[in-house]
Every structure is written in C-alpha cells, then in structure tokens.
Amino acid sequence: MKVSEALATRKSIRAFLPDPVPLETVKRILTQAARAPSGGNLQPWKVYVLAGAARDAFVRRIAEERKQHPMGERPEYHIYPLALTEPYRTRRHRIGEAMYAALGIPREDKAGRLEAFARNWEFFGAPVGMIFTIDRQMQQGQWADLGMFLQSIMLSAREEGLHTCPQEAWAVFHRVIRDYLKVPENEMIFCGMSLGFADETAAVNMFASERAALEEFAVVISE
C-alpha cells in the first residue's frame, strides 16, 4: 500500500469486528511506528497494549468505574481549548452532528448519544486497545512527537489491512487507568487507540469527516 493510499483510507473507525489481531502484527506496527520523528531523539512516548483476556478485563474495570462516574472526571490536560473560536468550533460541531446522523441518533436523544459515546470505553469492540502516555516533563515539541508516533501507528495499521481510532476520551479515566495498569506517576495518560478490523457494514463507519480546502490552511509563496 502506498503512503498516499494509507492517508486516504485512514479514518476513525467506531465499530470493529471481534476478529483477533496477531500480537506479532501489533508488535510489527509499533516497531515501524517508532521510526516517527523525534526532536533530540527523545522518543517521549510509551504505550500499554491490551489484547485478549487482558483487554476484556480492562474494559470491565472501566465499566465498573462508570457506575459511579459515568463520564469519568476532569482529565489532566484540556482536550480542547476552553474558549474555542471559529472556524474550529464549527468544525467540531459539524463532525459530531455528522457522526450521530450516521448512527440515526437525533440531537434530542441525549441518552442515545451518551450511550454511543460510551462505546469509546469499550474500544468500539476492537480486539486490541492501547493506552498512550508521555513523561510529564515534556513540552509542546515532544507532544508533537507523540502525535507523529500515533499517526505512524495508524498508517502502518492500514498497510496491514487494519483500522484504528485514536481516543482522547480515555483521558477522563486517568486515575483508574493509572492504578489498573500500574502507570508511574511521572507519566501523563494522553489517549487510547482501538486497533482491529473495521466492520464495513456499520453505519457509523460509512461517513468520512470533511477537510478544509488547501487554500484555507496553506500559504504558498513561490516568488
């Protein structure tokens, strides 16, 4: 698969088949992704991989926590700016509406939307779940490195015929995740990621998010 094909076909999948993914495949993807750029070669990322019975037990633990805290707690960082301006606010609103429209859940069905969102904490049924952390001493440059590592995983997964969904939603359960996975205090829990085979029949997987036109984000200077 060409890089251009991987980029064109990568999207956030929110319904996976239960088919297992060989751990050797997961290890190969992570090893390849570790070639992602890293300023000063710090490689500030760390990933906790959950598969099989370990993945299922982890999801059950989160389900138990949700009985007391259905939407978790405040994460250790702002997932979005507190006062999001345009055009970003509209973009965020439109993608949410498009996703729930694909699921057939109207705006007034608050319970239905919350139930759909809660699938995040089941890795959307994917057989492999990953939790990513970054050392607390790192700054903006190293967070960019972590982002490039995540993207490299997602593109390598496409080469293997797999799909992914990066999920910042896991950050709201940072305390229980830290306790359950024995994550050291110097590591900040950033996000999770689902990995597996996409359910191509699921309505939620049949829409693709919009992207701004080149002229909206690129300033091309040739003279």
Image (tube, rainbow, N blue to C red):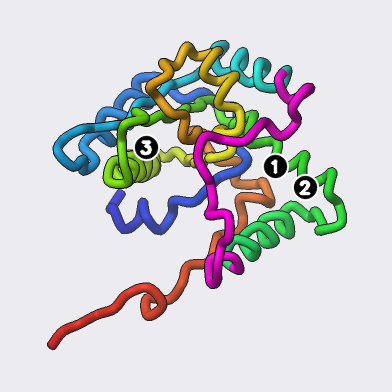
Query: Cα distance, mark 3 to mark 2?
Result: 32 Å
Residue at point 77%, 39% (across, down)? 115
The x, y position of residue 122, in whole percent, is 64, 29
The amino acid pointed to by label 1 is: Phe
- The image shows residue 24, relative to residue 110, as above or below, that is above
Q: Which mark is residue 117?
A: 1
Task: Evaluate whether residue 152 shows in this view.
Answer: no
**Residue 52, position in %: x, y?**
54, 15
In the foreground, 156 or 122: 122
Q: Earlier in the sequence, mark 3 or mark 1?
A: 1
Kind of element beneath mark 3? loop
What amino acid is labelled 2 in the image? Arg
Side (left or right) of 20 relative to 22: right
Residue indicated by mark 3? 160
Is 74 one of the magenta-colored residues? yes
Q: Amino acid at mark 3?
A: Glu
What residue range appears in magenta? 65-90
SS label for mark 2: helix
Residue 113: numbered disc = 2
Q: Nearer the viewer, residue 74 or 171?
A: 74
Q: x and y percent of residue 63 in the render?
A: 71, 22
Position of residue 60 in the picture relative to residue 107 (left or right): left
Please identify, in this view, whether the residue under mark 3 or under mark 2 is nearer the observer: 2
Q: For the C terminus, which image quadrant?
A: bottom left
The crowd level at tag 3 (other Cα within 10 Å; few <14, some 14-19, many 20+) is: some
